[in-house]
Amino acid sequence: MDAFGAVINQINSVLWSYVLIVLLIGLGLYFTFRTGFIQIRYAGEMFRVLTEGAGSKPKDKEISSFQAFCVSTASRVGVGNIAGVAIAIVLGGPGAVFWMWIVAIVGAATGFVESTLAQVYKIPKEGGAFHGGPAYYIQNALHMPNLAKLFSLLLLTTFALVYNSLQANTITLSLESAFGWDRAVVGVVIAILAGLVICGGAQTVAKVAEKMVPIMAGIYLVITVVVMVMNIEKLPSVIGLIISNAFVPQAAVAGGVGASIMNGIKRGLFSNEAGEGSVPNAAATAAVSHPVKQGLTQAFGVYVDTLLICSASAFLVLLSGVYEIGGKVTGIALVQKALSAEVGGWAISFIAFMILMFAFSSLVGNYYYGEINLAFLSGSKTALYVFRILVIAMILFGSVASLPLVWDLADLFMAFLATTNLYAIARLFKFSKIALDDYQAQKDAGADPVFNPSILPSLDGVQAWGVEQKKK
């Protein structure tokens, strides 16, 4: 098993040190320039469209733009925002936070492109619902069915099974540390609660996410802002430390600048998922009048995840001064120690509660992605029931297991997913650019943009919008 783990680590090292850095940053910059810095130029429009979606009421089986945003945020906002940030700082130093910011800013353009494409190539389901994502646009637009099936299987396995075992593992470890609760008992309770939600189907998951995400993110941000205000005089020096260490890391950082960049990019992608191909699965389910609306909404989600929540965790750790580069205390334990140093011992229980909220929301969000990709592979109800049993079984397994190898496998699968999806959106980018130009033209004319697929040079693979046009 040690030899297998060493091989996985070696493959991850190559993929993350060379392939993905070039692809993520390179394509992100390409999308940024080609869209005219959409992630900056359209920042206000992103927020407007998000609030517009929050005020809408979906019909029948429809999922609103805001609900789709909450589902994707539920999956994004998990242990990576707390434990992952602490791990990045311990391994890569404070400079890793800077590279997480870069991944977020550049990745917002990538997030816009992949989610807009997911909307363009979504497929209609009964009752006004939609399905879509990379597997769908790889098969229907690129006509690569085998690659689409591979992607779908990888995503289903990674998110619904592997990631959910990791989320459950984090929940039980955190509650055991805070309250001494038996991990097996906690695991059974979490599995039952998750089962009640996921067996309700996509709409139930969307409704739960819509309620949980704003509450949990708001509570966590408030407490970290309080800590920042308490240490306001240290804030400028901490920001300076993050920026300076991004290019000249402290001597204790093994691997120097390379380690800082790699840990920042890896944990940044794990957290905000821009370009990975997961978020488009949620983006495609939204009922909107124009694909660009959901593209903008999901691009804003990258900012919420990394520039807000991950930064909050980073400032919490760095302001406390209790971290040690290369030290043994890392992850959740480090965040608990940092907050305890600032506000007292009750912080251990508070972080345990936040981990429960963040990780549980990720459980249901990850399942949602899995269900969409299972529908791509098989429409059988039997397959769906078996899949739900497997998800619950992996939650139980993760609750009591030791999972260092599973984390490495998660990084490996994530690399494969991102590489496949980035290849697809690079080839299909021109369609998202046409949609963006159309959106801007309609906005300039004072209209609320409505998408007409006839503007595309080819309707190959476009299904949902054609159906809607016929109905009109």
Image (cartoon, helix red, strand yellow):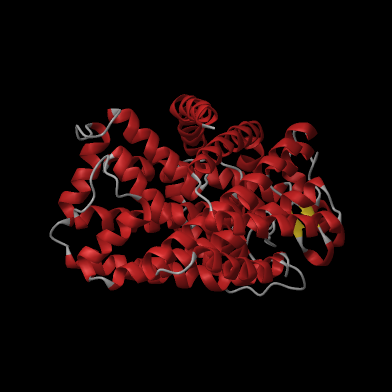
Q: Count the numbered circles shown.
A: 0
Say left or right for 60 vs 218. right
Say left or right for 274 vs 439. left
Is 390 above or below relative to 341?
above
The quadrant of the rendering that contains the N terminus is: top right
Residue 53 visible in rendering? no
Say left or right for 105 vs 400. left
The quadrant of the rendering that contains the C terminus is: bottom right
In front of the other: 121 or 261: 261
| Quadrant position of residue 365 | bottom right
In front of the other: 66 or 38: 66
In front of the other: 326 or 156: 326
Is 250 above or below relative to 297?
above
| Quadrant position of residue 460 | top right
Q: Residue at x 30, y 28 (%)?
A: 255
- Spot occupied by residue 230 in the image (x, y as percentages of width and height): 18, 67
Q: Residue at x 55, y 68 (%)?
A: 185
- Spot occupied by residue 366 in the image (x, y as percentages of width and height): 61, 55
Residue found at the far left of this picture:
233
